[in-house]
Image (spheres, rainbow, N blue to C red):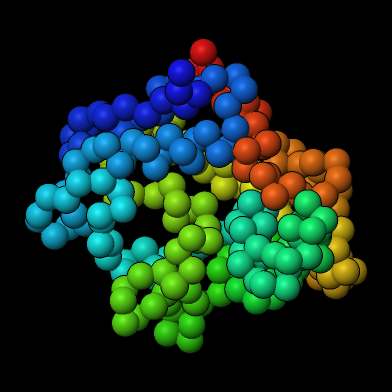
Amino acid sequence: MERVVLERREFPDGLGYDVTACHPGATVADYLGAVDAFFERSIWTALRQGCNRTGWNACEGCPGCCRERIPLTVADAVRLALSLPDVAERAQSAGVVTAEDLLQAIEAFGHIHTRGRAVDITLRRTEDGWCGLFNHSTHRCHRHAFRPLVCRTYFCCPVSHRAEKLRQRLLNAGEDELVRRLLLSSKGAELTARGLRLSDYPPGPWSETAGLSLRFESEALLAPLLTGLNLAR
């Protein structure tokens, strides 16, 4: 039985999808798997190109999204950390990713912008506004296997209100948890000096009591994010 169910929907502005059910034990990995599987078995119009292609992986994409703000969640930082050979070797041996590993990933790929007690952690952009992971020669992400959750869950088609609400809650909670983890790292004193407070980022849906498992997305439950969406079954 599918633990997260996505279904096709016709909207006034075209064909899209809705999230229609979530098992109480569904995880972030179940949600991401459902998104992948849904687009794999669906026929979509290639992005604004007027020709039909089959499946998620066949989409050639367009570079428009790669100039947008790309927020990073704690799961994204885990994945990006594991793309770094030295971190991957150490993490595989220990079975967990540490706060220092997350910090190393952010220093390699991300940008931390603070304004008072507000903070935004995003993928770094080039001087002309492109995502730092965008390959201009291929029009592809050159670390596609490690791309952030916001990219993995986006397809340019209409979505229901609750499908978008779930996606946004997932991203927001994931970024908050990344901030919390960085405040607990060696960068914590610097971030505190900028005005951030650990008390503003209490443990939430993405939190764990110890290190971050290499199967983090398979262990983070969706249930805390489903309030008011009428998706639990």
Q: Residue at x 21, y 56 (%)?
A: 47
Considering depth in this image, is 201 or 118 the residue closer to the camera? 201
Q: Position of residue 95 (x, y in %)?
A: 78, 51
Q: Residue furthest top?
A: 233
Q: Give the answer, above or below, for where 151 lies relative to 171.
A: below
Q: Residue at x 45, y 51 (%)?
A: 152
Q: Position of residue 83 (x, y in %)?
A: 61, 67
**Residue 229 visible to the viewer:** no
**Residue 117 placement: quadrant:** bottom right
Q: Number of numbered discs present?
A: 0
Q: Position of residue 186 (x, y in %)?
A: 88, 69
**Residue 217 visible to the viewer:** yes
Residue 61 placement, left or right of 161: left
Q: Give the answer, above or below, for where 4 lies relative to 64.
A: above
Q: Residue at x 65, y 76 (%)?
A: 108
Residue 60 placement, left or right of 133: left
Residue 183 placement, left or right of 170: right
Q: Residue furthest left?
A: 50
**Residue 64 placement: quadrant:** bottom left
Considering depth in this image, is 85 or 172 the residue closer to the camera? 85
Q: Position of residue 92 (x, y in %)?
A: 74, 58
Considering depth in this image, is 127 or 132 the residue closer to the camera? 132
Q: Give the answer, above or below, for where 204 lies relative to 141.
A: above
Q: Residue at x 13, y 60 (%)?
A: 49
